[in-house]
Image (cartoon, rainbow, N blue to C red):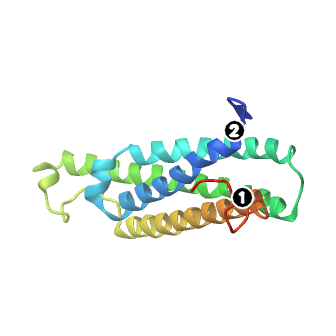
Amino acid sequence: MPTEIHGLPAHVLLVHAVVVLIPLSALLVVLSAVWPAARRRIGVVSPLVALVTLALVPVTTHAGEWLARRVPRSPLLEKHTALGDTLLPWAAGMFVLAAAVWWLGRRQTLVDDSLPGGSDRPAASSGPRTPPFVRVAAAVLAIAVSAGAVVQVYRIGDSGATAAWHGQFSQTAKSGHGG
């Protein structure tokens, strides 16, 4: 796994991808779970983005552990590394839900398309439809896990920024510097 990219610690670069992909995955999962028209348009993109996100989290964590061994230890760094270790289960949950919502939607589309009249057929048509409680449970879980993942990535990012920048800059501009 990469630890440096062009001489810079990989963690400080990879973390930006995670900070973008977690909320993007969350948005796609929730939209797919609660809005059938969006689910049909998003399709397999939601689980694919969630899979890339899931794969990137341990790569970023590994690069962060490498970096943590090369900077001075502090309570702020300890807090950040502890929080960083909590993101993988959230990313895994989002991937599982994205795949399940996609599969349920795909299954439903195949059933609707196989009926006379195709997907224009009313929802009350006969056939093996996904029970409403399953769709509602998937939507509730998608919202809960997505919200948890976004909150967690915020907490991790905030603690990392605090660890990196606490006491490292002045509230007032130094003389001789533009801006």
Q: Secondary structure at mark 1?
A: helix
Q: As drawn, which residue projects farthest toward the left?
A: 117
The Cα atoms of the two marked residues, 1 and 2, are separated by 14 Å
Check disc 1 and give the amino acid type. Answer: Gly
Check disc 2 and give the amino acid type. Answer: Ala
Q: Nearer the viewer, residue 28 or 78?
A: 78
Who's the residue at 43% across and 59% down the image? 27
Q: Which residue, given by chain and number where applicable, does mark 2 sit on?
A: 10
Q: Secondary structure at mark 2?
A: helix
Residue 104 in the image: above or below residue 8: below
Q: Is residue 124 left or right of residue 133?
A: left
Q: Is residue 121 left or right of residue 153?
A: left
**The C terminus lies in quadrant:** bottom right
Residue 154 in the image: x percent, y percent? 61, 64
Q: Is residue 74 left or right of residue 64?
A: right
Residue 42 in the image: x percent, y percent? 33, 48
Residue 63 in the image: x percent, y percent? 74, 41
**The N terminus lies in quadrant:** top right
Give the label on residue 160, or none. 1
Residue 36 in the image: above or below residue 54: below
Who's the residue at 69% across and 68% down the image? 171
Who's the residue at 89% across and 52% down the image? 72
